[in-house]
Amino acid sequence: MFDLTGKNALVTGATGGLGNAIARKLHAQGATVALSGTRENVLQELADELGERAHVLSCNLSDAEAVDALPKQAAEAMGSLDILVANAGITKDQLLMRMKDEDWDQVIRINLESYFRLSRAALRGMMKARWGRIIGITSVVGVTGNPGQTNYCASKAGMIGFSKSLAQEVAARGVTVNCVAPGFIASPMTDVLTDDQKSAILSKIPAGDLGSGDDIAAAVVYLASQEANYMTGQTLHVNGGMAMI
Amino acid sequence: MSDVLERVTKIVIEHLDVDAEKVTEKASFIDDLGADSLDNVELVMAFEEEFDIEIPDDAAEHIQTVGDAVKFISEKVG
């Protein structure tokens, strides 16, 4: 099950913890992966470790032209682009009353607009091939909201609405569009939390623990697979029961 | 048969998977050849690629038949 041999996947934000785990798991299932991010040396390290079937494509997602061109570069490097995982994202947290225009703009541009640009550019080949998988990594807070993150939550909720609409446009062509919504995932960001902060968070998670990158990557692998061909326009919530939607 | 008509016809046959005799100049993509709106968009993109031209959205809206496509493309490629 979930064999991805012969499939070519582009993962954005592959330098981050989640993107790294997603790229590894897709690769482990047999896919060829194109790793995209801003820190080329980190991407190269991962590619070297994966060995064959790994390509490095550095890209700054706040540069619209570069984003438009990325899927084509990926297709040229790998032969085609069958699976797009839009994972890159940033936060610029601030209470709305104190939020600057640029905090809003940057988050929307990198999290939401790049998803639109990447999807649009990736679709052409997928439509021709009559097969494609577009997977957006959103967040539980895109559905529940979170104070201090109006920009981030708007961008993540936007990804979900975008995916539902696009899913309806392209469903008849064998292209599915879905999201994965992680809850609280262990990362360098959560490592620095104090024990009190951690226990406050964990008290809200029925599973009693933070999630891992692998938990998210497993959901991505499923959505990328042939087995998920009847699954489209959906959001898989992977959050240890923190929010049941 | 003009070169443009020949190439357009070939794309339409391939893309919509229809019999060659159905693809006449008067044939409407949607009414006669079973295309949906997404097929129309894909056809326009295929024409753009084949003839290396750009077909703006407002022009694309008026390309409803094989003949419309041939006429527009012929004018563009001179």
Image (cartoon, helix red, strand yellow):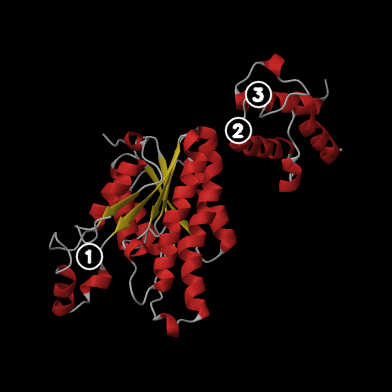
Query: Mark 3 falls on what kind of element?
Result: loop
Q: Amino acid at mark 2?
A: Asp
Q: Chain of mark 3?
A: B
Task: Name above or below for residue A30 compared with residue A70.
Answer: above
Residue A111, given in percent of the width and then of the height, sits at 45, 63
Residue B41 position, x and y percent, is: 64, 39
The label number, if any, that marks residue A95 in the structure image: none
Residue nearer the viewer, B38 or A20: B38
How crowded pointer 2 is (Cα within 10 Å; few <14, some 14-19, many 20+) is rated as few
Checking the image for residue A186, the label placed there is: 1
Q: Which residue is mark 3?
A: B33
Tell me the amino acid under the disc marked 3: Leu
Whether residue A90 is visible to the viewer of this picture, yes or no, is no
Question: Quadrant of the rendered structure where residue A155 is?
Answer: bottom left
Name the element at disc 1: loop
Marks 2, 1: nearer the viewer: 2
| Disc 3 packing (10 Å; few <14; some 14–19; many ≥20) | some
